[in-house]
Amino acid sequence: MSVAWQEVRIGDVFKTGAGGTPLKSRKEFYENGEVPWLLSGEISKRDIKHAKNCITPIGLDNSSAKIFPKDSVLVAMYGATAGQVGILRINAATNQAVCAIYPSDEVLPEYLYYALLSKNQELVSKASGNAQPNISQSKIRNTKILLPSIFEQKRIVAILDEAFAGIDAAIANTEKNLANARELFESYLNSLFLRNVESWPEKRLDGLCEKITVGHVGSMAQRYQGEGIPLLRSQNIRPFEIDLNKVVYIDSVFHAELKKSALKPGDLAIVRTGYPGTAAVIPECLSPVNCSDLVIVRPSSEVSSHYLAVVFNSPYGKSAVTGALVGAAQKHFNVTAAKAAQIPLPSRKEQDNVVSEAAAIRAECLDLGKKYSQKLSALSELKQSLLQKAFSGELTANFAEKETDEAVA
C-alpha cells in the first residue's frame, strides 16, 4: 500500500445525518407528496434513483426528515437491512433508519460505497439490540476507512466496477438457474396429476384414514424445556421432511397428557397455518414425538402416507388446500377441510411408483439447487476478496503490474 493512503474516521471527513418520519396520522404530510422519501429497506443496491414513497413539503418541514443531496452515500441502520449501502442519485429524504453521508470533494461517492461494502461485517457486528438491531450514526461516524488520492480512488472504482459487473451477471444467471431447479420438481408434480387426474378415481381423505385429528391448539410455552420429547410445530414441517432446527421439547408427563396429539412413525403431519398444506411423513427414527397445531393423518392400508405427502406438496394439492382454507384474521387448514379433501387414488403399486419417481427427481433437483447455492456463496466470497485486496492496495498494484507486462509484451 502506498504511503499516500491515510486511515481516517468517516466523521472526521464527512458530514452525516439521519432522516425522520412525518406523523402518519397527518394525511397532508403524505397525500400527493412530491418529495422522494426512502425507507431503510430500499437501501439494497448501489445506485438509488427513485423512492417508493413520497412526502409533502409541509410533511418535510414538520418533521426531522431532511433533503439529502445527490451523491450522498446511504447506510441502513436498523433491522434486517442494517449495514446495507447505496449511493443516492437524486435529492431525497429518508426515514430515521437511514444514515446519510454527505458528498465530499475529497472522496468519490463510488469509492466510499465500496469502502463501506468492505466494512459490512464490521458494521453489522456493531449493531446492538435484539428485536431491532441498530448500528447508530455515531458508530458509522467512528468507522475507519483507508483514503488514497483521488487518482487512486478512480482506479480502484474502475477496476471494481468492471469486476462487480461480471460477478453480478454471474449471480443473476445463477439465481435464475437456482429458481429453475426449484421449479422443476413442482413442474413434474403438476404434470403428474394433470395427466392422470381423469384416470385415477378420487376418494375423500377421511375414507382412506384410520385417524384425522389436530395437535394441541393453544399456548403451552410454559411447558417447553431444553430436552425431552420433541414437540413438532408448523416451522418444523418442510415439504417431505422434518426440520428439527428450533424444535422444542416437553417432558414425558405432559406427553402422556397430550395423548391425542402424539404422532407415530408413518403418520402424515400437515401444516395448518403459515404455509398450510405443507406435509411430511414422521420417520421411524423420530419416536416418541408430539405436535402442536398440526393436522395429523394416520392412513389405512389403502393409501401410502408417502404418496399423500406427494399429493399435498404438489401444486395440485396446494390448489385444493387453498380453496379449503377457513378463518378471517389468519387463514388455516382445519380438520374438517382435511377430512373432505379429495385424493386421486391409483393402485398401491402405482402409488409406490409415484413416490419412487418423485423422490428421485426431487433428489436431482436438490442436488442442482445445492450446486447453484454453493456457486452463489463462492461469488459472494469473490466480491469480499476483491474488496479486501482493493483496500489493502493489492488490487491496483496487481493491475499496474499486469498493464506493465502487457505493455512490455
Image (spheres, rainbow, N blue to C red):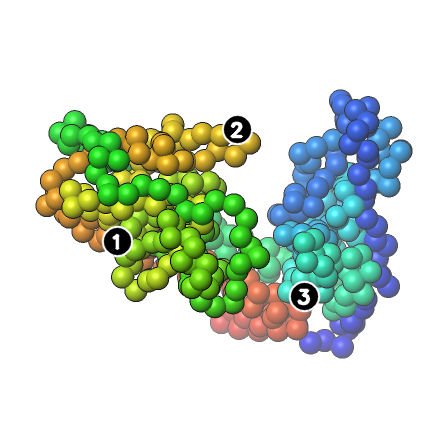
C-alpha gap between disc 2 and disc 1: 33 Å
Mark yes or no: residue 162 visible. no
Badge nearest the viewer, 3 or 2: 2
Q: Is residue 232 left or right of residue 42?
A: left
Q: Is residue 254 left or right of residue 390?
A: left
Q: Residue at x 15, y 30 (%)?
A: 201
Instruction: Name the secondary structure under disc 3.
Output: helix
Residue 303, relative to residue 146: is it above or below?
Answer: above
Instruction: Name the secondary structure under disc 2.
Output: loop
Question: Disc 3 residue type?
Answer: Ser
Query: Measured from the top left, where is residue 151 in percent x and y?
Result: 73, 62
Which residue has dot 3 on it?
Answer: 125
Question: Disc 1 residue type?
Answer: Gly
Mark identifier at residue 328? 2
Q: Is residue 20 left or right of residue 288?
A: right
Q: Nearer the viewer, residue 198 or 75?
A: 198
